[in-house]
Amino acid sequence: MQIGAEPNIVLFFDCPEEEMVKRVLSRNQGRVDDNIDTIKKRLKVFESLNLPVINYYSEKGKVHKINAVGTEEEIFEQVRPVFAAYEGHCLSGHIMDDLEIEESEETWTWEIGVYYSFGDLFGTIFYLGTYVIASLSDSSFVAHYAPKEHSLELRSEIPSDFLPKFFPKGSFLVGFSSIFWREAWKYGERAFRYCNHDVGHAIAAVSIAAAGLGWDVKLLDGLGYSDLEKLMGLGCFPKFEIPSRSVKGKIPEIEFEHPDCVLVVFPNGVGKFDVDYKGLSSAISEFSKLEWKGKPNSLSKEHVCWDIIYRTAETVKKPRTVGDRFFVDPFQSSTLFSEGVYKDLTIRQVVRKRRSAVDMDGVHVMERETFYQILLHCLPWGAQGGGEKQGRPLTLPFRVLPWDPQVHAVLFVHKVTGLPKGLYFLVRNENHFDDLKRATRSDFEWEKPEGCPAHLHLYRLSRGDYQQLSKRLSCHQDIASDGCFSLGMVAHFEQTLRDKNVWMYPRLFWETGILGQVLYLEAHAIGISATGIGCYFDDAVHEVLGLRGSKFQSLYHFTVGSPVLDKRIMSLPAYPGPDINA
């Protein structure tokens, strides 16, 4: 029998035949076949079918033999350490699936993230808050993740009842913070936007990695900035005083960490549960009294402070919002329109293959069914049918967010078989459809293309060759015109900030990053590639669409196509081991 899954551990409860016969005969179920001859025959069949399986996995080193004679408590005590060791293994696998791989070009090496980071500068920092894991620690703890070593650096031990008090058994927390300077030294003012895009990519990476191991993930967005600062132990470092203008000099405190968000990772299938944000915030307030270990490394000796980055970050700091509801909605699978388009790869293989294409070949043509399938996986509500207006996201990885989808996509279709070249629009929240039609050019068609699935809200705006225009809009970069299609992510902007407050500003970038991570994985799953484009002219994008004011806002660009491979570059394992200098 083939079930399409490989177990990580196999428990073999070894019980002598005499004991099994005694247990069956004493179960008193009144069955006519509960006699010693029938039972022995059944046990022989059981042995003939199962021992080859045990032998097979024994050779793989996955079998854990448990003496099944004794009370339930005595037998379970033998099982407990097996699962405790496996918890550490799962946690390690989860973190590795979130993070990085190394590439080498001649004598130069650099890290490539499983999640996307602008310029591979990794301004996003990863924190872990977890319960006692016997193979890792004797206490609950908060740790900083060191990706180069794939190790956890202990920041502080925390009360053992903290997590169980607020979350289901087995849950742990993942936090992200940003060091704006890591992006700002290269990209200047754009660093704020780039860091928040990266946060979105990282959120999606955690959500997908967790799902692959049987967990679910939700953003704990009822917490405020000060809660996150205490939870990650960032309040004990010197505060950065924002200057009144851009300045240059030695400013070490500019490399501070800005806490962005925290996610709760919990076992899938626990059902609905609520989060007491007021009680959680109160418990976190005690973390400022803990002993916090470690001092962050410094990146630069000289700095340039673009004050607008830090003024914006200060303006959009979120307070604790006690009234926020916490939802765990039933999981909804994404729609499969053309399953045959995907390569025979596991989730882990796909996420670890993620790369940004440097150039597209300008030749590869995508099938229409493949194009539709990619876009179906960009929808947040999945295969529950079309025509109805949608609410909270239900599919991976969009279900991690507590708000309704606010980001759409304008697509420049270049090379898709059976689909006319032109300008298209993917509506990811039908509640915005009427506003979009009113806000854009009156001569747009808003017609569903041929063969488009009914529940894919894709519309053709106009026919024509948009390759050169897409290139100009993306800062004259060929990569936007040489792929199969490129796109600009357009957010429902002004009303969202009014309704949900200014702290939604970075969160809109998170949503674009999550969508971008999906596009990366979809591209690699079908055997091509993609690239996030951070440089673009948003006013020019608005002019093409006919947008006026700030009702809708362009926030991120992307391109999907067949990459030009540089044969000078080779991929190496991220963690080759202690005997190899990586």
Image (tube, grey):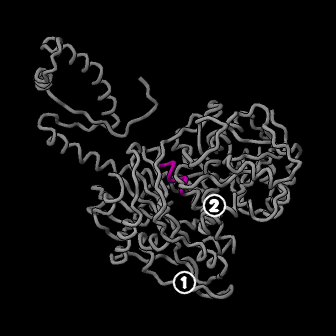
Within 10 angstroms of label 2, few (less than 14), some, or many (20 or more) residues?
many
Within 10 angstroms of label 1, few (less than 14), some, or many (20 or more) residues?
few
Magenta-tinted stretch: 203-209
For the point 82% across and 54% down, the residue is 440
Residue at the spot of label 1? 240
For the point 55% across and 37% down, the residue is 345
Residue at the spot of label 2? 508
For the point 84% across and 38% down, the residue is 420
Name the side, left or right, on which 546 lies relative to 399.
Answer: right
SS at badge 1: loop
- 151 to 458, vertically: above or below: below
- 525 to 54, vertically: above or below: below
Please, what is the three-letter code of the amino acid marked with disc 2? Answer: Leu
Foreground pick, 256 / 343: 256
Tell me which corner region of the image, top left, top right, bottom left or bottom right, holds residue 74: top left
For the point 68% across and 62% down, the residue is 495
Name the side, left or right, on which 453 lies relative to 127.
Answer: right
- Please say whether residue 206 is one of the residues in the magenta stretch: yes
